[in-house]
């Protein structure tokens, strides 16, 4: 039986309409559609494999930019790479430091006097740019002031007090190499059945203890076995500690009281997500996304000035402190007149004392900022893992022990976080006859808004990787 042409044409048109409808539907699927149950456990804070193309979970990967052309715009802006190179050139020709170049333990902006900063307005010439340098040469700590405009060292003071500058990565590397080449370490390692190639040694704490160590740049070194696991902290060579003189490059004390303590096995100690053999025994968690259809409400001008609503402050990365917030101001919501809230704020120290009297533990009293540098040990933040969409990422321009600048990318991120989950409103006891059931229309659902700037720094804290979030919290009532 022959099919009528009209029927064939109708069937073809039906197929075309069906295909167009399916195409339109697939392009307009909800972005939060559930993933298949068999793979939904992959969609969590550690994995973005279920993020669909064009979904709200996608974000651009922040790439560090070229900082060689940076110029300062504010009196408190950190030294640029060009300025750091200029300081290095000035120091390399400074007679008191010749013929060798000193080890640089700190090189940062010598901030102008507070009065000059407060008087400065946008568009004014910048105050003279100076660098503050802490250098170590022949066992002496030099505190130098370098005028970048004149190209001269204007001050050079030798610190005769107690203590030494913060450690450099070169100091730590030297201490570990000295320890690994020590013969007694080799013997103790073999007795424990551990190969030298499987050793990971760290410097848990600097400082001296007792008259035999005083007046020397001393640091303790302890070792672990990394065989079969990246989590080497789970496999310590307990009771083994070496005291290293960094300047003399020698082990001045070797202690091994743990020869009879077995090294823990590395089975199932790999904490990394990709190393897990099975999905976690838990109900699958769906992705969470912060929506800002019109983009973020804050802006970052000239790389360091953060503005949000009636708030404004200067933000920068610091090699020692990690994050520095300066000139924090809020403008009056009625008059618009700015009021200073804080001139300068930062973490002066992060002190972690273990307080265990054991011979191999008593000295463990981390001072993350003063000894290692909270900025120098910062790790790059990962978009969507550490910071949500619309985050602003800031790099750190730091200085190595040889006086050369380097970039620590994406160690600060700035983003908005909604914190108005629970509203507050004034009310009275009903027997008084007051009816305060309505919320002022001006504030509506945002009766009390808490605004958070999370300035998150991922730190490698020697004994474990951890995230430390320095939270700058500002609360502003929006109701009349």
Image (cartoon, rainbow, N blue to C red):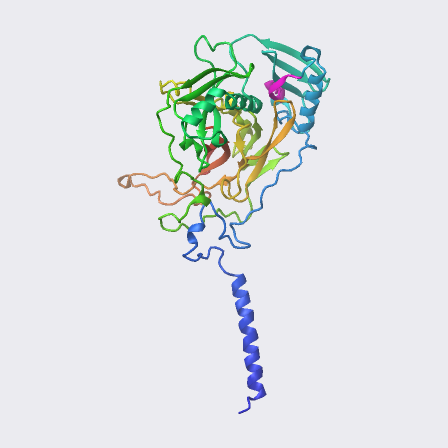
Report the quarter where the C terminus lies: top left
Along the line of sight, the residue nearer the viewer: 422 or 2: 2
Q: In percent of the image, x 72 and y 18: which residue is there?
A: 151
Q: Is 21 above or below relative to 257? A: below
> Is residue 98 shown above or below 293?
above
447 vs 4, left or right, is left
x then y, percent, for residue 347: 49, 25
Query: Which of the 4 image quadrants contains residue 479?
Result: top left
Residue 247 appears in the figure = yes
Q: Residue at x 67, y 24 (%)?
A: 84
Q: Nearer the viewer, residue 260 or 425?
A: 260
Front-lying residue, 369 or 345? 369
The image quadrant of residue 413 is top right
Tell me which segment is drawn in magenta.
101-116
Res 352 quadrant in image: top left
* Outermost residue to the left: 431
Find out whether residue 248 is within the magenta segment.
no
Residue 365 x, y percent position in the rendering: 43, 21
Q: Nearer the viewer, residue 226 or 337?
A: 226
**x, y (%) of residue 395?**
59, 34
Q: Position of residue 200 (x, y in %)?
A: 48, 29
Which residue appears at 56% of the width and 70% of the height?
20
As drawn, is 127 to the left or to the right of 177?
Answer: right
Asked if residue 477 can be seen in this view, the reply is: no
* Total tally of numbered discs in the picture: 0
Picture residue at 54% right of the left edge, 77% below the top: 14
């Amino acid at each position: 039986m022959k099919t009528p042409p009209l029927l064939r044409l109708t069937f073809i048109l039906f197929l075309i309409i069906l295909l167009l409808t399916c195409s339109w539907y697939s392009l307009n699927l909800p972005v939060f559609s559930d993933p298949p149950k068999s793979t939904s456990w992959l969609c969590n804070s550690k994995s973005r494999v279920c993020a669909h193309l064009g979904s709200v979970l996608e974000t651009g990967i922040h790439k560090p930019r070229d900082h060689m052309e940076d110029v300062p715009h504010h009196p408190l802006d950190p030294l640029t790479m060009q300025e750091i190179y200029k300081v290095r050139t000035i120091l390399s020709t400074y007679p008191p430091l010749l013929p060798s170049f000193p080890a640089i333990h700190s090189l940062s902006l010598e901030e102008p006097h507070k009065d000059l900063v407060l008087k400065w307005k946008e568009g004014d010439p910048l105050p003279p740019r100076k660098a503050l340098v802490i250098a170590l040469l022949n066992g002496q700590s030099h505190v130098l002031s370098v005028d970048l405009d004149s190209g001269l060292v204007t001050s050079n003071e030798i610190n005769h007090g107690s203590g030494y500058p913060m450690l450099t990565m070169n100091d730590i590397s030297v201490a570990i190499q000295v320890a690994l080449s020590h013969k007694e370490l080799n013997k103790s390692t073999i007795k424990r059945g551990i190969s030298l190639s499987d050793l990971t040694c760290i410097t848990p704490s600097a400082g001296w203890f007792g008259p035999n160590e005083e007046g020397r740049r001393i640091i303790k070194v302890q070792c672990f076995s990394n065989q079969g696991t990246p989590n080497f902290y789970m496999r310590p060579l307990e009771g083994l500690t070496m005291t290293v003189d960094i300047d003399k490059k020698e082990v001045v004390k070797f202690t091994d009281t743990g020869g009879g303590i077995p090294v823990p096995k590395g089975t199932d100690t790999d904490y990394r997500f990709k190393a897990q053999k099975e999905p976690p025994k838990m109900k699958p968690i769906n992705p969470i996304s912060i929506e800002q259809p019109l983009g973020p409400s804050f802006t970052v001008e000239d790389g360091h000035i953060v503005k949000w609503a009636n708030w404004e402050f200067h933000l920068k990365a610091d090699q020692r402190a990690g994050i520095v917030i300066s000139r924090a101001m809020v403008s009056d919501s009625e008059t618009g007149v700015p009021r200073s809230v804080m001139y300068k704020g930062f973490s002066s120290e992060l002190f972690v004392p273990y307080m265990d009297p054991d011979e191999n533990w008593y000295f463990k009293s981390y001072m993350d900022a003063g000894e290692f540098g909270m900025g120098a040990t910062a790790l790059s933040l990962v978009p969507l893992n550490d910071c949500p969409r619309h985050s602003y990422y800031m790099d750190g321009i730091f200085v190595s022990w040889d006086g050369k600048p380097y970039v620590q990318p994406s160690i600060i991120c700035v983003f908005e976080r909604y914190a108005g989950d629970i509203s507050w409103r004034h009310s009275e006891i009903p027997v008084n006859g007051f009816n305060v059931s309505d919320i002022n229309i001006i504030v509506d659902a945002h009766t009390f808004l808490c605004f958070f700037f999370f300035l998150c720094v991922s730190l490698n804290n020697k004994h474990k990787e951890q995230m430390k979030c320095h939270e700058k919290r500002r609360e502003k009532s929006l109701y009349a």
